[in-house]
Amino acid sequence: MVLKGQVAVEGIGIGLIQIVNINIDNFLNAYIQEDMETEKNKYQQAVNEVKIDIKQLLQKIKNSDDDPSIMEAHLMMIDDIMLAEKIISNIKQGQDAPTAITNASIELENMFNQLEDAYLKERAADVKDVCKQILFKVIGAKRFSLVGSNKIIIADDIEPSLMASFNSNQVSGIILKNGSMTSHSIIIARSKGIPTIVGVSVNLEMVNNETMAIISGEGHLIINPTTKEEEYYQLQKEKNNKLLSYYLSTAKLPAITINKKEVTVAANIATPDDVEYLEDNGVDGVGLYRTEFLFMESSQLPTEEKQFNAYKKAIMGCNQKLCIIRTLDIGGDKPLESIQLDGEENPFLGYRAIRICLDQRDLFKKQLRSILRASAYGNTAILLPMIINVEEIIKTKELIKEIMLELSKEQTKYDQDIKIGVMIETPASVMMASLFSKYVDFFSIGTNDLIQYTLAVDRGNQKVSYLYNYYNPAVLHSIKRVVDAAHNEGKWVGVCGEMGADKKGIVALLSLGVDELSMSSILVPERKEFIRNFNNDLIDTNLLLKCKTPDEAKSYLSTVEKQIDNSIKSKFT
Ligand code: PEP
Ligand code: MG
């Protein structure tokens, strides 16, 4: 039997199925509520035990090559005042500890789920995960435990802490019924290189823990494969492993196309700890540091010192390669506890990003001051989000000048030549790119928002997701216009939206003349090799721009992508 899903982590997995399916109803039914103080104590005791578990897991992660940042976030989440206060207040209102934890979890999950930003939305999964761990301790239920090795795990969804406990010897693949492509769990699976497919409807009555399965690498789950199929996929897997070690061995080489264009391949980061992965993956610096996380971590705004330390860490971690720090991109769809934002009818078109920063000058000044102070420690650039007119650039540059004068007076060091760029995310910025290019050092195209605003298609709305893609000629023409405008002024253009990480996207962007791509570090070794095999002769930019429909452009880009993939694979056959 073959089922189809969406590839979340590429690769082939072969093994026996193990189903993650823990029913806690019996534990909950057997739970006996005691007096309020005892319920509070049971909760506190559980919190302490979970903290010990997470610290042990963190220790293991730190001894491996895995990314500790998500588990570190869990450790902070468990101490989050808002979460603790909600649980205690529920207990005070007469709820038993399990109900108090479950209700607080749902309330906070809903709050985070309403946020538009995929990264911030993921905090809902973190809350759920941490609360589930506390709940299991309170009711005395055991969490899922893996038996044996080379397993294909099947679950509705897997919480990040469970995913973090897996390693690629024990787990050869993961099948999720739900699960989004950008979830923390998927990010962890990706960092461990565990092949994963999401959106697969497996009928659990048809499989058990003795069932053999294969994850094909192209989004297929083959249940009970034939011996021939097993042999075929085993061979493909060995070939893929060779390719992966090849990508890693060449990761530090520059990404120069066959036509001799050197493309900078940088990383998108969410916390300064993410810079740890730059070196091994051959990443050329940070193309986008989303500073929102620093502001979302607590109910209070981060102090100048806290911001300075975070930015300095990221900058120093780039080892003189460029570290592009984006100023605060919140508002409307990404509310902050620490800033009062009124509910808006059209939050996407409302009070957000640069609009808030220029309005709340002290907040903006503190962030720019922190970035400027940190710029003394390496190669830094400031990136401004959601720009729609030149006044926003001029006002920001004036503020930066003012801060520079203050810092000079105080004899505080900073980079006097710090580079300033703007995100191209709105149709207005596309239309005005020629003018903007005279005021800034570079552009970074945020295709996630550019697609949404150009096509008037909400990037998070499933109902219209079929319209949301970069193949639409309107998006391709916009990018071309921006690249031409920048190059006319001798400025460079990067892409930090998801299009820059996608192979068909890369084909289009290189053909349109983009100079830099920024993506998750883990993808960099493979994408660099892809770029090294890119040849302008494979694609005619005029033909790409003449495509009348998204499907036409997609199929053209697909053909080129396959040719490049084949030329890489041919080196190994
Ligand atoms: C984008 O819009 O493409 C982008 C990189 O910014 P964000 O996803 O943070 O909105
Ligand atoms: Mg954006």
Image (cartoon, rainbow, N blue to C red):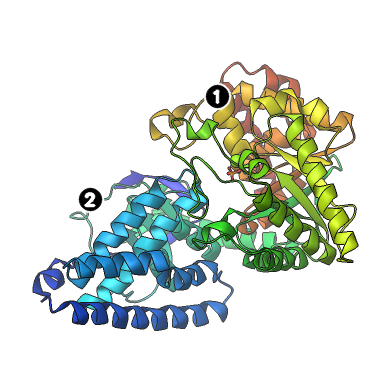
Quarter of the image holding residue 150?
Answer: bottom left
Q: Which mark is residue 390?
A: none
- Left or right, 283 with respect to 418, comes to left
Q: Residue at x 39, y 45 (%)?
A: 5
From the top left corner, tell me how far across and down residue 420 is, in percent: 80, 45
In the image, is residue 568 above or below residue 455?
Answer: below
Q: Nearer the viewer, residue 295 or 532?
A: 295
Could you tell which of marks 2 and 1 lies nearer the N-terminus?
2
Task: Tell me which corner region of the image, top left, top right, bottom left or bottom right, holds residue 489.
Answer: top right
Q: Is residue 495 left or right of residue 373?
A: left
Q: Secondary structure at mark 2?
A: loop
The spot of residue 94 in percent (x, y) is 16, 68
Amino acid of disc 1: Leu
Residue located 68% across and 40% down the image: 506
Q: Residue 203: which numbered mark, if any?
A: 2
Quarter of the image where ligand 1 sits: top right
Determine whether, in the image, residue 521 is placed left or right of residue 284: left
Asked whether residue 179 appears in the rendered view, the answer is no
Q: What's the mark number on residue 455?
A: 1
